[in-house]
Amino acid sequence: MDNRDQDSGSPGLYRFCVKIPIRYADIDAQRHLNNVAYFTFMEHARVEYMRQTGLWDGRDFGQVGMILAETNCTYKAPAYLGQTVSVWCRISYLGHKSFHFDYSIRTEGGEIATGRSIQVCYDYAEQRTIAMPAGWRKIIQDYEPGLDPEPGA
């Protein structure tokens, strides 16, 4: 699945993009996109990436198999009501149990933020971390160009 056709401004190695209109509820008292909305937008892109690449079917939450360990966002420029953001995301790193999503959040004026989230593969029934499923690793390696190598590889 290649979503480059959704936005002609594909930044670097990013192949996957979702477009999200900025709603009134996303705006803060300073009349620009609230900082919390960026994290919601990254989450939306991450979930759609997983669904569209076949990592998760979007129905069985018991099959998600990961837990969010860390997330960050670097704000570069404001965005406003009426604009649409393009949230580009990619998996940039695969470890034994963890992987990283990188994000580039853009409007028609250019990049307004970058972010990263670290996910850890997790068995919710057993309440413990697990190795990345081989099927996930294959899907990601087949889809993502320029992955950072696994430590020790």
Image: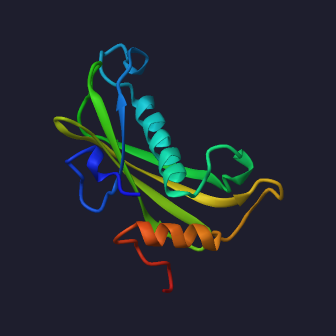
8, above or below 55, in the image: above
Q: Residue at x 70, y 59 (%)?
A: 122
Residue 103: x and y in percent read 37, 50
Residue, far left? 109
Q: Nearer the viewer, residue 29 or 148?
A: 148
Residue 63, percent across and down? 70, 53
Q: Residue at x 66, y 52 (%)?
A: 64
- The reply, left or right, for residue 58 in relation to residue 48 is right
Compared across the picture, whether 54 is left or right of 8 comes to: right
Q: Nearer the viewer, residue 86 or 71?
A: 86
- The quadrant of the rendering that contains the N terminus is bottom left
Reply above or below: 84 against 104.
above
Residue 98 percent across, percent down from the top left = 57, 65
Q: Residue furthest bottom?
A: 153
> Residue 15: percent from the left, percent from the top?
33, 57
* In the image, residue 17 above or below residue 128: above
Colouring scheme applied when the structure was drawn? rainbow
Q: How many marks?
A: 0
- Which of 27/136 is in front? 136
User: Which residue sits at x=44%, y=42%?
Assistant: 42
